[in-house]
Image (tube, rainbow, N blue to C red):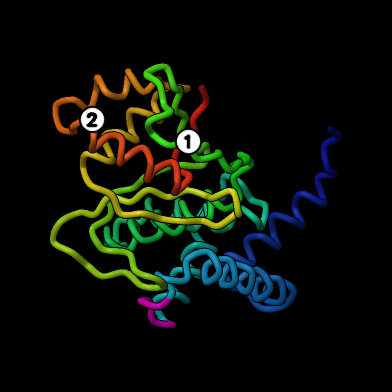
């Protein structure tokens, strides 16, 4: 790669500094354009959090981000991630607000994941064998949140809630609140390329009967949280 001329580097540096410091002239024009991109990326990527912030709070976030953040991935389509990194590094931001950003970022991440999700043909439990192999949905992830997620909103709770987030074969991004036991099972499955039904029984025997595990497996397969092969 050829090095740009020194004069070009100086001009770009001057323009960048002017945008960060909100100077008048050409810098102001480009600054307004970039602020518009940041605003659009934030409101489209974090719609729930957007509802809880005032215009003044959002504007301060955008201006601080523009003035202070050294982007790791400077392309425009990475703005949502860079905003989250900036908020995580900002000690003045409330923990709950950052948690909500992390949740909404996971939704976006799952939506654009390159992993393909295919519909697994449902097989009734009686036809499963102990060697039936179980694999997690490749987009599956989870998060602990200090609030309950409802459509387009979040409600603070005293106890943390556990959520699975994943994409279905119909390209829908879904979330599901789960119990501690569910979280343990899915964490175990995610840590392995695949496991057998027999192996899963061995790690759930202390808190789940065979009947309960069968019910869990049928529901999880129907929800496309897992797939199976025989």
Q: Which residue is mark 1?
A: 123
Where's residue 160, x and y in %? 20, 54
Question: As rendered, which of 208 and 101 lies closer to the eye?
Answer: 208
Q: Which residue is mark 2?
A: 210
Could you tell me if the residues under marks 2 and 1 are in contact, i.e. CB atoms within 8 Å?
Answer: no
The residue located at (61%, 41%) in the rendering is: 118
Q: Which mark is residue 11?
A: none
Instruction: Kindly indicate the quadrant of the structure image that contains residue 153.
Output: bottom left
Instruction: Kindly indicate the quadrant of the structure image that contains residue 155.
Output: bottom left
The residue located at (31%, 24%) in the rendering is: 200
Instruction: Please count the marks in the image.
Output: 2
Where's residue 139, x and y in %? 51, 42
Q: Is residue 123 toward the left or the right of residue 36 in the image?
A: left
The residue located at (39%, 25%) in the rendering is: 191
Sequence-wise, which precedes: disc 2 or disc 1?
A: 1
Magenta region includes residue 85:
no
Give above or below for 192 relative to 211.
above
Q: Dot 1 lies on which element?
A: loop
Range of residues picked out in magenta: 51-55
Q: Tell me how far mark 2 sits from mark 1, CA to CA.
A: 17 Å
Quadrant location of the N terminus in the rendered image: top right
The residue located at (59%, 45%) in the rendering is: 113
Give above or below for 179 relative to 30.
above
């Amino acid at each position: 790669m050829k090095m740009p001329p020194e004069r070009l580097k100086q001009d770009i540096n001057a323009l960048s500094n002017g945008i960060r410091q909100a100077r008048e002239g050409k810098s102001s024009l480009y600054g307004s354009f970039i602020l518009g991109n940041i605003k659009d990326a934030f409101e489209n990527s974090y719609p729930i959090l957007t509802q809880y912030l005032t215009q003044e709070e959002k504007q301060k976030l955008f201006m601080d981000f523009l003035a202070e953040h050294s982007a790791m991935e400077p392309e425009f389509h990475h703005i949502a991630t860079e905003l989250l990194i900036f908020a995580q590094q900002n000690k003045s931001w409330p923990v709950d607000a950052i948690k909500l950003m992390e949740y909404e970022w996971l939704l976006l991440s799952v939506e654009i994941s390159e992993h393909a999700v295919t519909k697994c043909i449902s097989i009734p439990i009686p036809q499963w064998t102990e060697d039936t192999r179980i694999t997690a949905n490749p987009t599956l992830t989870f998060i602990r949140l200090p609030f309950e997620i409802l459509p387009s909103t979040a409600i603070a709770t005293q106890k943390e809630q556990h959520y699975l987030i994943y994409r279905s074969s119909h390209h829908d991004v879904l979330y599901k609140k789960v119990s501690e036991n569910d979280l343990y099972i899915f964490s175990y499955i995610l840590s392995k390329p695949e496991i057998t039904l027999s192996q899963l029984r061995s790690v759930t025997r202390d808190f789940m009967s065979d009947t309960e595990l069968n019910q869990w497996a049928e529901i999880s397969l129907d929800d496309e949280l897992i797939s199976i092969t025989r």
